[in-house]
Image: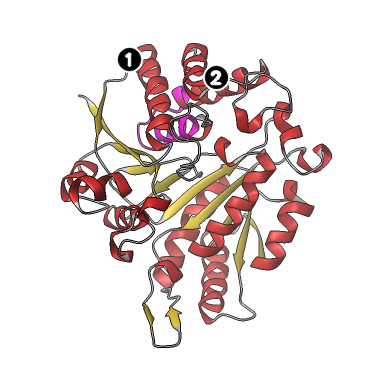
Amino acid sequence: MSRRIVVLGGDGVGPEVTAEAVRVLERVARLAALDLEFVEAPVGGAAYDAHGAPLPAHTLEACRSAAAVLLGAVGGPQWADIPVSARPEQGLLALRKELGLFANLRPVVPTRELMGASPLKAEKLAGVDILVVRELTGGIYFGKRGRTAGGAFDTCEYTAAEIERVCRVAGGLAEGRRGKVTSVDKANVLETSRLWRETATRVFRDEFPRLTVEHLLVDAAAMHLLSRPADFDVLVTENMFGDILTDEASMLAGSMGLLPSASLGDAGPGLYEPIHGSAPDIAGTDAANPCGAILSAALMLRHSLGAPEAARAVEEAVARCLAQGLRTRDIAAPGERHVGTREFGRAVAEAVSL
């Protein structure tokens, strides 16, 4: 039976990088005898321009019936002045909520050949293998908000149930890794963070007693991500903190273009996307790094399509291409030859071996 993958290219470089991820998935499908069907649908600013909404009803319906969803990026300066409810980013937030995607997984594993691209010294990066689990549907991004004559407000709200379920995801993942989980909050100031710490403590104590658990305030976590990144295994945190910390952690790998993500729920399709934005300044120039999108496709193979060997094959193909010196502009050293988005994607597809 065919497995349908909905491809949401979105805005800016999104369609360019998803095209290369699809190229790699098509190669994997042939080698692994996977029956995959790819269907494109609009989202973000492109959807607003064409249909008057950042998440058209037909796009949402297609995603609900899919095996998985691959997304590129949304947003751009040309949509800065439209109503907030219609902005491209609202389409992505709505998609996550409608699909019940509450856990965002962002792995950060620096590649030996690219350690020079990171602002940190190579010795700081040795042994770094971090998995950030970010709560995705609660917190300040979804709380009540408004404007007054002289001010504005955004409300951060969490329930114990929302915290419990994302901590269970983090705990299960940590059990299959190095057995350590770090919960990040701001419990010295915020009431939601005090609930977060109490709930996380209870879940990890009662349901994952074999794990080593530490709690860090978010400002301390930001510092330690740079001072002792190899000490982290699984890091779990709330929505806004996770958004900020994962962008910081991307610099451990050297470029946001390198990192993938998976957004998962209790059931239904997962959403897979690179962590970078739409990069409108380089859109259409064949300069975007497709690694994040391709590695997101590997996460899709692992978490939604039940093909872990194929996932490893894609990850190994990316690693081989980097080891052979293939570079896109963002990760190339000064004066070093670099290739375009399409050439890198073709090279990875050809390097896949099963």
Q: Residue at x 41, y 48 (%)?
A: 263
Looking at the picture, the colour scheme in use is secondary structure
Instruction: In the rendered view, tell whether residue 180 sits above or below residue 206.
Output: above
Q: Could you say which quadrant of the image residue 183 lies in?
A: bottom right
Secondary element under disc 1, as helix, strand or loop, is: loop
Residues drawn in magenta: 293-310
Query: Percent from the top left, x then y, of residue 7?
Result: 30, 35
The span from disc 2 to disc 1 (Cα, nearest Å) is 18 Å
Instruction: State the residue position of label 2.
Output: 317
- Mark 1 Cα shell of 10 Å, populated few (<14), some (14-19), many (≥20): few
Of the numbered discs 2 and 1, the one sitting upstream in the chain is 1
Q: What residue is at 43 percent from the left and 76 percent from the top?
A: 157
Q: Secondary structure at mark 2?
A: helix
Q: Is residue 191 magenta?
A: no
Q: Which residue is mark 1?
A: 33
Considering the whole magenta stretch, tell me its main secondary structure: helix
Which one is in front, 256 or 224? 256
Label 2 neighbour load within 10 Å: few <14, some 14-19, many 20+: many
| In the image, residue 31 above or below residue 312 | above
Residue at the spot 46% in from the left edge and 51% down from the top edge: 104
- Residue 305 in the magenta stretch? The answer is yes
